[in-house]
Amino acid sequence: MALTNYILYIIIGCGLATWLSRILPLVILKNMTLSKKVIEFLSFVPIAIMSSLWFESLFIQHIGHLPSID
């Protein structure tokens, strides 16, 4: 019984950490105005994340997945 409570607390804690990491920046930046340079810099973040995920899948072999270009 104690193990299931422990697992439940871990799940709740992970959910809370995920929720806080997504909501806290919105709450903090809601009342602030960002400069045009900061907004322009942040517009490149999705492109950088997508390209890093794409290159990682091309150059690192994952056992059990389809072969990739080396």
Image: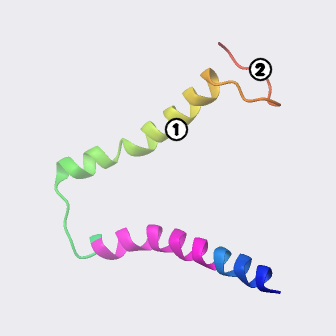
Mark 1: few/some/many CA within 10 Å (<14, 14-19, 20+): few
Of marks 2 and 1, which one's residue comes earlier in the chain?
1
Choose between 69 and 16: the one closer to the eye: 16
Residue 61, image quadrant: top right
Q: Is residue 21 magenta?
A: yes
- The residue depicted at 80 percent of the width and 25 percent of the height is 66
Circle 1 is placed at which residue position?
50
Q: Foreground mark, 2 or 1?
A: 2
Circle 2 is placed at which residue position?
67
Where does the image place residue 16, in percent across and percent down from the top left?
54, 77
Q: Is residue 8 magenta?
A: no
Instruction: Specify whether 62 is left or right of 52.
Output: right
Secondary structure under badge 1?
helix
Instruction: Specify whether 14 is left or right of 8.
Output: left
Q: Is residue 39 above or below residue 28?
A: above
Q: Which residues are magenta?
A: 12-28
Q: Is residue 9 above or below residue 33?
A: below
Amino acid type, mark 1: Met
Secondary structure under badge 2?
loop
Choose between 22 and 62: the one closer to the eye: 62
Residue 7, image quadrant: bottom right
**Distance between mark 2 and mark 1 Cα atoms:** 20 Å
- The residue depicted at 66 percent of the width and 81 percent of the height is 9
Where does the image place residue 43, in percent across and percent down from the top left?
35, 46
Q: Quadrant of the N terminus?
A: bottom right
Amino acid type, mark 2: Pro
Mark 2: few/some/many CA within 10 Å (<14, 14-19, 20+): few
Instruction: Specify whether 51 is left or right of 33.
Output: right
Where does the image place residue 28, in percent across and percent down from the top left?
29, 74
